[in-house]
Image (cartoon, rainbow, N blue to C red):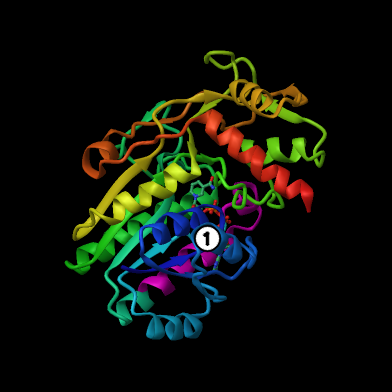
Amino acid sequence: MKILLTGGTGYIGSHTAVELIKLGHDVEIMDNLFNSKITVLDKIAEITGVKPKFYQVDLLDVNGMDKMFAEGGYDLVIHFAGLKAVGESVEKPLLYYKNNVGGTINLLECMKKHNVKKIIFSSSATVYGEQGVTEMTEDMQTGVGITNPYGETKFMIEEILKDVAKAEPDFEAVILRYFNPVGAHESGLLGEDPNDIPNNLMPIIMKVSLGEIPELSVYGDDYDTVDGTGMRDYIHVVDLARGHVAAMNKMNPGVSIYNLGTGRATSVLEMVAAFERASGEKLPYKIAPRRPGDLAKICANPTKAEKELGWKTELDIEDAMRDTIRYLKNVKKK
Ligand SMILES: NC(=O)c1ccc[n+]([C@@H]2O[C@H](COP(=O)([O-])OP(=O)(O)OC[C@H]3O[C@@H](n4cnc5c(N)ncnc54)[C@H](O)[C@@H]3O)[C@@H](O)[C@H]2O)c1
């Protein structure tokens, strides 16, 4: 299959590119390189033996996308491109709505013009908002109690895809709601670039380990959880990448929605301990007050993906820590 990955030099896109190329698919990547590096293409080539064709094109550049689609002849688009820093989205909401929602509308128009009917979209567990529930299933209500513009963009794009599918009976969309992606490729060549503004746990652990942040702040140790700290469903990025392959193989007209998570929640202190075990180093941390809006525990119910896609996670936190540390060693070498 000929597949376009928007945002394909990014963290999740690059790991998905590797899985698709290994299966013999013809993968092309478009990215504006805002949050990723062109050198990722060489890393993909080092792992797979194939360097994907690359377009440095922005979702907001309609002419550039039109040209790319005219050349491409794609069967499927996997749409990773988007801005993802939750805190930044609160400060710059228009940037997020324009880039993520406006950019996706441009992409969908371009797909329609060039007769591309299939899309897989990177959504997020944030669409479930704050409902006081710890285990999320796909049929739960979404869009209520979302606390930031980033999450709103994911919700809005989901609604847009549903409306397009209603209007066009041969349109096929899969919405994948990711939980908390962590880890790196086992080669140590691909991972989450710690140059990002860290807003979630693993990049902060990486920055503490690199000595760029003095210590990890653990927000709250008095939640009703195993050790009082917040618990999340951390999914290894390679399992997540394989979830896209499984989804791609079972596409149908209309919109299908799947949670991609492990179904197990891990606490912040359990993550710290796993990092310390894998690295052999002590990770300095301090307990800080709870952050407003944080929930005690959020976890995927991944049963639907298992039943319908035949997909489930195979890697665990120990694998994620081992692979992250291998990637960190490469980063430190530079
Ligand atoms: N990493 C997570 O924790 C997480 C969780 C849930 C959902 N997601 C979603 O998954 C997708 C991929 O996330 P990631 O972690 O790989 O992020 P990433 O930042 O590593 O990758 C996204 C890529 O999109 C590119 N991009 C952004 N705006 C663009 C534009 N206008 N035109 C072209 N390229 C553009 C960036 O340069 C980057 O390479 C995103 O849509 C993100 O919101 C991520």
Q: Position of residue 278 (x, y in %)?
A: 64, 27
Residue sitting farthest toward the left: 169
Look at the image and tell me whether residue 204 can be seen.
Answer: yes
Q: Amino acid type of disc 1?
A: Gly
Q: Residue at x 76, y 36 (%)?
A: 208
Q: Is residue 143 magenta?
A: no
Q: Quadrant of ligand 1?
A: bottom right
Residue 204's image quarter?
Answer: top right
* Farthest-out residue, front: 49
| Residue positioned 48% across, 85% down in the render | 63
- Left or right side of 224 for 208: right
Viewer-closest of 27 and 306: 27
Looking at the rendering, the stretch of residues picked out in magenta corresponds to 84-108
| Figure check: 22 above or below 54 | above
Is residue 88 shown in magenta?
A: yes
Mark 1, ligand 1, within 8 Å: the answer is yes
Percent from the top left, x then y, of residue 329?
72, 43
| Residue 80 at x, y percent in the picture | 47, 59
Q: Residue 15, image x and y in percent? A: 50, 53
